Amino acid sequence: MTCQHLKDAGEPAPRTQYEDGCPECVAGGFHDWVHLRECLSCGVVACCDSSPRRHMSAHHAESGHPVMRSYEPGETWRWCFEDELLG
């Protein structure tokens, strides 16, 4: 099963390592993020839900942007917050 949000987001190319970490965590003096994610609507990079502060979920809650993707090297999967589907 897929959703229109995932279809509209397209198929992203794999990323290379993002060296700077989660910008919000770093700004707060934290370095304990687990994995990074990228918003496919605006390009914001933030930490995943396995990280203590869950900045990508917070970004979705604030912005309503529906789809994020993994920012881990070699990964191309996406997640639709609205429909709770992996793409």
Image: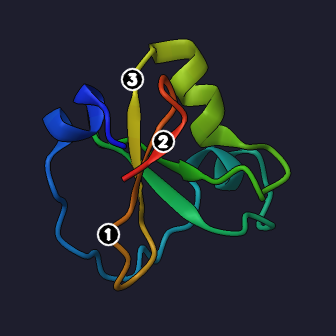
| Dot in front, 2 or 1 | 2
In this view of the protein, can residue 42 be seen by the observer? no
What label does residue 65 carry, if any? 3
Q: Which residue is more in the foreground, 29 or 57?
A: 57
> Residue 81, position in %: x, y?
52, 31
| Above or below, 63 relative to 43 | above
* Labels 1, 3: front one: 1
The mark nearer the N terminus, 3 or 2, is 3
Of badges 3 and 2, nearer the viewer stands: 2
Mark sitting on residue 76: 1
Residue type beneath disc 3 = His
Other residues around mark 1 within 10 Å, as few (<14) / some (14–19) / many (≥20)? some
The residue at the far right in this view is 52
Q: Can you identify the residue that label 2 sits on? A: 85
Which amino acid, by three-letter code, is at mark 2? Leu
User: What is the quadrant of residue 3 in the picture?
Assistant: top left
Can residue 80 be seen here? yes
C-alpha separation, residue under disc 2 versus residue under disc 1: 14 Å
Between disc 2 and disc 1, whose residue precedes? Answer: 1
**Element type at marker 2?**
strand
Residue 48, given in percent of the width and then of the height, sits at 64, 54
Residue density around tag 2, few if under 14, some if 14–19, many if 20 or more, within 10 Å? some
Residue 16 lies, in percent from the top left, at: 31, 82
